[in-house]
Image: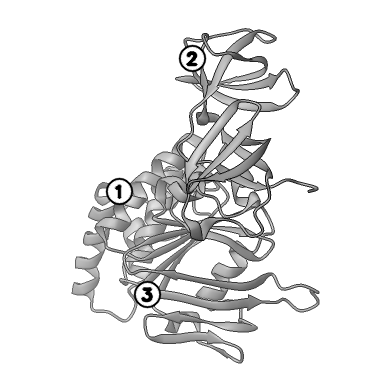
Amino acid sequence: MFLTLHQVDVRYAGQDMPAVQGVSLTLQAGQIGVLIGPSGCGKTSLLRAIAGLEPVTAGHVQLSDRVVSQPGVTAAPENRRMGMVFQDYALFPHLTVAGNIAFGLHGQSAAHKSVRIQEVLNLVGLETVQDRYPHELSGGQQQRVALARALAPKPELLLLDEPFSNLDVDLRERLALEIRGILKAANATALFVTHDQMEAFAIGDVIGVMQDGHLAQWDDAYHLYHRPESRFVAEFIGHGVFVPGQRSLVNGRVEVQTILGLLTDEINPADIPTPFESACDVLLRADDIVHDDAASVKAQIVRKAFRGSEFLYTLRLASGDMVLAHVPSHHDHTLGEWIGIRVEVDHVVTFKQVGA
């Protein structure tokens, strides 16, 4: 492992509650981690603590075999061998692309600077614009310059605070994939902060969902989506709704009776909740609901959003419960129309009923 946080708290003066509380995680060398969550959840405060810009009030931050933060001890940012990319890129307007990159290589010989500048320019695909100034570049090019400058000194850890927030939506997702490729080619270890789920899914090997200063789950995208550990994570990640159900254990399987029929799933005995309550809420993602004209269950279309290759339908069942469904866009049904649906789930995800 490379980055280790153990029970980290960050508290600002005058605040009743810590901005970050009890966060533990590990990031392996060469991995790309992402912190995501709603505004004010503590993700940027946690990143700043890792960078050494904020002291920790409990726990510790460890880089490789070095503890760099603990109560009363905060190693200076410049002594942590970290690179940082900010929201506004912080490029020097009076320096060329090459000059901006060279700034991170102060104290090194001119020959070494020249070689390293060309290496990172080639890495980020900007070798043809090295003599331009920041105002002559697109937003995406400026972002890659900021990344190249941060990578030039070969930091042990790269921190990125919402690096795509100033870019339009289409460019953000494309650039996220490009930068993932750049970081992997550089064998860099990196930690991002973002508020955009698609960005997080595109770039992260492991993703942390923050909630009110706590780390709700630290996992890969697949498990966050299909195996959320809390109702908050289930609601925050992806499109989904909850419908009421009655569950039982039958020969090592969970069986849940719902208004859409019986759902079953194999279960590890260690995952059986204690106490086991029969009344539950079942998480149904939009991709769990299949449009099927022959199905016995019917639902009324109350909203639809065109997504190019598909519609996202919001459907009301006869019971009044709502579900979501991804439907191929050539199935262009009208609002108010009743269509047949059925459930296809690989994983049955249930939580305690709200108010139960």
> Looking at the rendering, which quadrant does residue 22 occupy?
bottom right
Distance in Å between CA atoms under marks 1 and 3: 34 Å
Q: Which mark is residue 329?
A: 2
In this view, 184 is above or below 175:
below
Along the line of sight, which residue is nearer the eye, 290 or 258? 258
What residue sits right under mark 1 in the picture? 129
Q: Can residue 341 be spotted in the picture?
A: yes
| Residue 159 position (above or below residue 184) | below
**Which residue in the rendered view is the most extreme toward the bottom?**
72
Quarter holding residue 229:
bottom right
Asked whether the beta carbons under mark 3 and mark 2 sit within 8 Å of each other, the answer is: no
Q: Is residue 133 visible?
A: no
Crowd around label 2: few <14 · some 14–19 · many ≥20 (10 Å): some
Where the N terminus falls, by quadrant?
bottom left
- 95 relative position to 124: left or right: right
Mark 1 residue type:
Val
Residue 116 point in image, percent of width and height: 23, 67
Vertical relation: 156 (above or below) 60: above
* Tag 1 near tag 3, CB within 8 Å: no
| Location of mark 3 (residue) | 2
Residue at 45% of width from left, 76% of height from top?
A: 4
Residue depicted at 47% across the width and 42% down the height: 172
